[in-house]
């Protein structure tokens, strides 16, 4: 890990904890406008969150220093940091929301008003019956939802293997870290050393297929230079794309509908 610390340090500007804690604070505006009446410990906590949130807009190595200086200037001018929060909160909110949006639309997803409860996506025949069943059993079991309009189901449409890499396919590679070749990519790489019936493999194929559809990961990992530690956390531990204990949510269905559904 050490040779890559400089790279991971640059990712600290993506840290969304400041935005999250500020968003979850009750009566935030009242507290920030009453800055002078807050206990020193509470001011210090808010200060750290406000600087984190500002850093989402200031990604340079000196972003923390610049944000701290700008924050102090606003407090001297206004007597409180509310305007500072209002300046940087929208961009941080956009970054947060971006982790739950589809990036890169596929062109082969078929979902229309003619059959609104069914979405079909081509998948290249894997050449093994057990893998075929594993794919359909896990992906189709996860990628389904029941909304106010009734049940919805994603179905894999297996096509003969003609070597077409533009069709979604799975490849097993010994020792590989499971991944997809980009958001809305076509190749799912799985570890050939892992039993496909293990929980880890079953969850992983459900998660990786989310990348095929264009969903990004929603966890963060970076190096905190000041603390000298690696930081890793998930934005939502119940979300399939964030956590190994997560599952499909209404927001996945809604985003799929926004991007792929043709009335």
Image (cartoon, grey):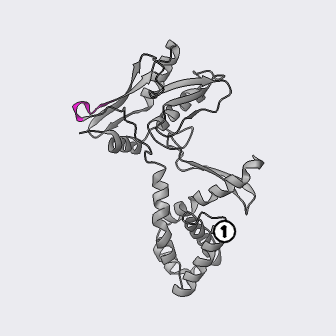
Vertical relation: 123 (above or below) 45: above
Query: Can residue 138 be seen from the camera position used here?
Result: yes
Q: Residue 12 falls in which quadrant of the image?
A: bottom right
Residue in the foreground of this view, choosing between 185 and 94: 185
Residue 156, placed above or below residue 262: above
118 in magenta: yes
Q: Quadrant of residue 6?
A: bottom right
Q: Is residue 46 left or right of residue 148?
A: right
Q: Is residue 8 magenta?
A: no
Mark 1, Cα crowd under 10 Å, few <14 / some 14-19 / many 20+, is: few
Which quarter of the rendered picture does the C terminus lie within? top left
Q: Where is residue 66 drawn, in percent x and y? A: 62, 73
Count of number-bearing discs: 1
Secondary structure beneath label 1? loop
87 lies left or right of 51:
left
Percent x, y for residue 244? 57, 38
Q: Residue at x 58, y 21 (%)?
A: 196
Find the residue positioned furthest to the right: 2
Q: Is residue 15 visible?
A: no
Residue 42 placed where, x, y %?
Answer: 61, 73
Q: Look at 43% across and 24% down and name the residue there.
A: 123
Going 62% across and 78% down the picture, which residue do you hit?
69
Query: Which residues are drawn in magenta?
Result: 113-119
Q: Nearer the viewer, residue 124 or 65?
A: 124
The residue nearer to you, when weighing 48 against 45, is 48
Query: At x 63% / y 22%, what residue is drawn?
Result: 192
On the image, numbered disc 1 is attached to which residue?
62
Q: Position of residue 178 (x, y in %)?
A: 60, 32
């Amino acid at each position: 890990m050490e040779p890559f610390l400089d790279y991971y340090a640059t990712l600290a500007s993506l840290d969304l904890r400041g935005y999250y804690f500020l968003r979850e604070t009750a009566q935030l505006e009242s507290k920030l406008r009453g800055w002078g009446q807050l206990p020193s410990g509470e001011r210090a906590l808010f200060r750290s969150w406000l600087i984190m949130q500002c850093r989402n807009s200031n990604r340079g190595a000196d972003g923390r220093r610049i944000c701290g200086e700008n924050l102090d200037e606003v407090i001297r001018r206004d007597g409180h940091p509310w305007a500072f929060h209002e300046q940087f909160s929208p961009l941080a909110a956009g970054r947060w929301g971006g982790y739950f949006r589809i990036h890169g639309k596929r062109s082969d997803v078929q979902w229309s008003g003619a059959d609104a409860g069914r979405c079909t996506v081509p998948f290249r025949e894997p050449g093994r019956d057990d893998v075929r069943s594993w794919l359909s059993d896990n992906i189709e079991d996860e990628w389904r939802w029941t909304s106010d309009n009734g049940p919805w189901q994603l179905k894999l449409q297996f096509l003969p293997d003609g070597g077409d890499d533009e069709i979604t396919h799975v490849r097993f590679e010994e020792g590989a870290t499971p991944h997809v070749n980009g958001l809305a990519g076509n190749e799912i790489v799985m570890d050939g050393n892992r039993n496909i019936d293990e929980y880890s493999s079953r969850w992983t194929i459900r998660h990786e297929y989310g990348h095929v559809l264009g969903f990004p990961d929603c966890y963060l990992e970076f190096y905190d230079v000041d603390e000298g530690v690696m930081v890793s956390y998930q934005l939502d531990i119940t979300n399939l794309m964030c956590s190994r204990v997560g599952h499909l949510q209404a927001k996945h269905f809604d985003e799929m509908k926004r991007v792929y559904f043709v009335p």
